[in-house]
Image: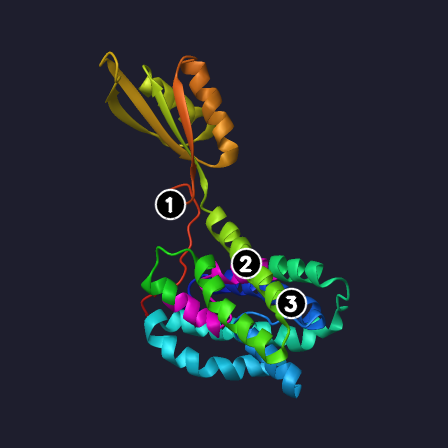
Amino acid sequence: MEKYFGEHWLRDTAVELIGSVLTGIAIYNFAVPAAFPMTGFSGLALILYRLFSLPIGVMTIVLNIPVAILCYRLLGRQFFFKSLRCMVLSSLFIDYVAPLLPLYTGGRLLAAICTGVIGGLGYAMIYITNSSTGGSDFIVMAVKAVRPYVQLGKIIFITDAVIIGLGGLIFKDFDGVIYGLIIDYIYAIVTDKLMYGMNAGKLALVVTDYGKAAADKIDELCGRGTTIIEARGGYRGDHRDVVMCACSTKEMLTVERAVRLIDPNAFTVILESNEVLGEGFKSFRVAQKQEDR
C-alpha cells in the first residue's frame, strides 16, 4: 500500500473521503439544481448530463483517462494512484450518496456561495494529501509542479474560467457564467486560505538590549525557538540585539508578554507570515513528485 499510496495512506484516505463527501454535496446538491456552468471536468460532465442525461460521476472518470495518462510521468506514480483512488471516491459520492440528500432549491446566489465554500473546503482537503480528483486537477497540479511559486488558487481560477465560459455559451446562460465565476473565485480563495493558512503565522522582530534573556523567556513561556541578530542603532550606532521569532497567531500574545517581562522598552515589529516551514510547524507536499520505491 505504501508503494502506491504513500506511508500515510490510511490517514490520507480518511481525509479524501471527507473531501469527496463535501465536493459531492457541492456539485450535486447545490450546483446541479441551480444549473450552474460548473468548474473543472465536473463542469464538462455537467454539460453532458444536461445535454444527454449521462451520469456525472461516470463521465468524470471517462474524461479523466487521457489527461491522467499524460500527467503520469510529470507527477509520479504515487500521485497518480492516489488521484485515481480519490477520483473514484468522489464520483461514487456524486452518483450514489449525494442523491440521497435533499437538493437546495433557494436563490442562485446563495447556491453559488454554498457551492464555492463547501466545494473549496472539499478540494483543499484533497489537495493537502498531495492528491486530486483528476481531470482539470491533473492540469492544475502539473502547472503547480512546473511553477511551484504560483498559488494553487490562481491556477484553479484561470483553468476553470475557460470551462465556465464554455458552459455559459452552450446553454446561453450568461447569468450562469457570472455565478460560475463567483463559484470559481470562492473556490480559489477558500482553497488558498485553508491550504496556505495551515502554514501561516506571525514573525516578531524584537529590538532590545537583552537579546539572550528575551530569547530564553520566549522559549520558557511558549516553547518557540528564536534567532538573535546583532545590529546597530541607526542614530547613535550603539549595539542592539534583534530577536527574531516565528510562531502561530495565538502564540504571538505570549511572545509579546515574554518580551515585556524582560524589556518593557523593547521595540517590537510583528509581521504576517504567509507560510512558515521548519521544526514545530506543519508542512505538506502539493504537486511534488515523490520517488517511486
Coloring basis for residues: rainbow
Cα distance, mark 2 to mark 1? Answer: 27 Å
Q: Based on the displayed image, in which of its 4 quarters is residue 14 positioned? A: bottom right
| Camera-side mark, 2 or 1 | 2
The residue singled out by tag 1 in the image is 277
Dot 3 or dot 2: first in sequence order is 3
* Residue extent of the magenta highlight: 119-142
Membership of 274 in magenta stretch: no
The residue singled out by tag 2 in the image is 185
Q: Please tell me which residue is depicted at 61% across the width and 78% down the height of the picture.
A: 46
| Camera-side mark, 1 or 3 | 3
Marker count (numbered): 3
Cα distance, mark 1 to mark 3? Answer: 42 Å
Q: Is residue 73 above or below residue 271?
A: below
Q: Are marks 1 and 3 in contact (CB under 8 Å)?
A: no
Taking 72 as reference, is 62 left or right?
right
The amino acid pointed to by label 2 is Tyr
Q: Which mark is residue 175?
A: 3
User: Residue 138: horizontal and vertical position, in percent?
Assistant: 43, 71
Taking 228 as reference, is 47 left or right?
right
Q: Name the foreground residue: 210 vs 200.
A: 200
Q: Please tell me which residue is depicted at 38% across the width and 62% down the height of the picture.
A: 144
